[in-house]
Image: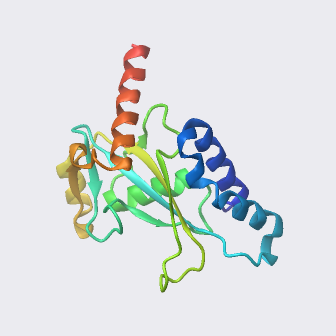
Amino acid sequence: MSVDREDIAREIYDYRRKYSAEENLLEAVIPQLCAHARAGAQCAIECPVVEVSGLLVDEQNRVLTTPHSRRGAFPQRRLAESDDSLRAAALLTVVEASGTSDVWIVAGQTLPIVIEVAPQIPGAGYAGSRLTFHYVFQTYTAADALNSKADQTRVSWLPIGHLSSSPLGMRLVSSLLAAEDAMKDQR
C-alpha cells in the first residue's frame, strides 16, 4: 500500500485544526493535492513533492542529527511508493539513521509537529513546491550505543536548546513539555 494524496490532505487538515495559526502557510497546497487526488494518473498539475523528517529525541533532550541530511541535519527523505503512511515513513527514516528500532512516538503527538512548505527550487529535480512533514520520536537508548550502531552514518546529538530559536525547535520543545505534563497527569 502507498500513501495517497487524500491521506496527505487529511493529515494537513488535522494539522490545520490543531495549529490554526499556520493555516495560511498550507492554503496554497491543499487545492493542488485535492486536484491531484481527483485526477489520479491523468493529473497535469505540478504537484508538491512530499518529504518526511524524523526528529529523534533521547532521554537527555538531545536531537539526532546526521551531517549529510539536508536543511537542519535531521533524518529526512522523499516519500516512497512503498510507504504505508507519513508517520511510518518518518519512523523508518529515523530507525535507518539511528541504527536502533527502540523508537516510539512522543505521547500525544501523532500529528507532525511542523509541516514546512517550500517553493519550487530551480534545478532541484522536481516541478512543484516541497512539503516536509516533521514527526517527533523518542528513544531511551544510550547515545553511545546509537552512535556505535549507526557509526557508518556518523550521527551526532544536538541539545534541544540549540534549536529553540527556530520555529521547528520551539514546536519541538513545547511538544516535549506537553508530553511530560501528560505523563505526570497519568501517574
Q: How many marks?
A: 0
Q: Position of residue 50 (x, y in %)?
A: 56, 65
Nearer to the camera, 104 or 177: 177
Left-right relation of 61 to 8: left
Residue placed furthest toward the bottom:
123
Nearer to the camera, 51 or 140: 51
Q: Answer with the quarter of the image where residue 27 lies.
A: bottom right
Nearer to the camera, 71 or 149: 71
- The way the protein has been coloured in the rendering is rainbow
Q: Answer with the quarter of the image where residue 136 lies.
A: top left
Q: Residue at x 45, y 32 (%)?
A: 107
Quadrant where the N terminus lies? bottom right
Residue placed furthest toward the left:
144
83 relative to 140, above or below:
below
Q: Position of residue 46 (x, y in %)?
A: 67, 75
Left-right relation of 68 to 109: left
Q: Residue at x 54, y 46 (%)?
A: 22
Quadrant where the C terminus lies? top left
Q: Position of residue 11 (x, y in %)?
A: 63, 48
Q: Position of residue 58 (x, y in %)?
A: 27, 42
Q: Residue at x 50, y 46 (%)?
A: 112
Q: Answer with the quarter of the image where residue 83 lies.
A: bottom right
146 relative to 177, above or below:
below
